[in-house]
Image (cartoon, rainbow, N blue to C red):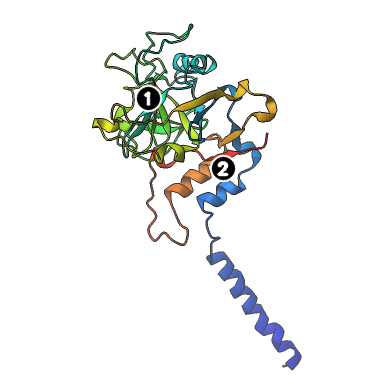
Amino acid sequence: MNITSRPIIVAIPLLFAAAAFAQATPAKPKTSAEIVAAAPASAWKVVADEDLLMIDLDGGQRVVIALAPAFAPVHVANIRALVRAGWFAGITVNRVQDNYVVQWGDATEKKPLPAGIVTPTPAEYERPLAGLKLRPLGYRDAYAQTTGHVGFWPVVSDGNAAWLTHCYGMVGVGRGLAPDTGSGAELYAVTGHAPRHLDRNIATVGRVIDGIEALTALPRGTEALGFYKEGTPRPAISRATIAADLPAAQRPHYQLLDSASPAFGEWVTARANRKDDFFIRPAGAVDICNALPPVRKSPV
């Protein structure tokens, strides 16, 4: 045998072995963060300026809320009217209950509402599922037949009706015992473990998409249900604004990952099947409140 041919003969099985190894070693799955970072521009949905509510606290912090008129149109219209009348300026945070909610409104309950506020306000606790493009989450839920997303909203359904669910950061309307007593003048944000039992009992009108830490860091109320004691100092709202009312150059812009995009489906799968270096046993499931669509600020 010609000695010069031996390296070629030896290399052939090595090439086959390398190819077999490459086929047997699957590519490392992407983490949910990597999927979000790589999501194309088409996968992101812009929050409309008319649906972007900014609440400035007297300590200088800003809380940004995306409003959901498709689920509570009368309440959202009331909130916009209250903002544009300057009604929220000067009202206070009255309740900070640990692992539950932060609630703000007129502590005296005597501040007159501006003209045009619809009250009594219809109990917009749910809406027909028909007409909504619901992307099912695909994993079981303890509270409802189906959970999923519509656009960038976490939605729950019994097959006929659909409603926004009380996940962390979601914003609801405080009310009295009667279902039609919540106008939108008193609001709360969920700042703890998702109180899903509140679903379909209170109108849910939006989600905090920026500045949640301004609410979670507030001193806890010392009275029952986390209310502040009468006469004690309370954080106040210095200003509330709808982004559409600001000059174009001053408007903040936010985008959320759209549930209709392929990137969102990939992201949900990654959330349910964590396979990065830290996780030993993927759960194979995800709760709707652990699948809130990611948010990012955008320059325009």
Task: State whether residue 106 is above or below residue 137.
Answer: above
In the rendered structure, which amino acid carries the disc numbered 2?
Answer: Ala
Label 1 to label 2, Cα distance in Å? 26 Å
Q: Quadrant of the C terminus?
A: top right
Q: Residue at x 56, y 46 (%)?
A: 36
Badge 2 element: helix
To which residue does mark 2 refer? 263
Q: In the rendered view, does 239 fall on the left or right side of 253?
A: left
Q: Nearer the viewer, residue 230 or 97?
A: 230
To which residue does mark 1 refer? 159
Crowding at mark 2 (Cα within 10 Å: few <14, some 14-19, many 20+): many
Task: State whether residue 86 is above or below residue 226.
Answer: above
Q: Quadrant of residue 166?
A: top left
Instruction: Locate residue 233, reporting x and y percent.
Output: 36, 31
Q: Earlier in the sequence, mark 1 or mark 2?
A: 1
Task: State whether residue 36 is above or below residue 148.
Answer: below
Q: In the rendered view, does 26 fall on the left or right side of 125?
A: right
Badge 1 element: loop
Q: Nearer the viewer, residue 70 or 247?
A: 247
In the rendered structure, which amino acid carries the disc numbered 1?
Answer: Gly
Instruction: Locate residue 7, reporting x and y percent.
Output: 70, 86
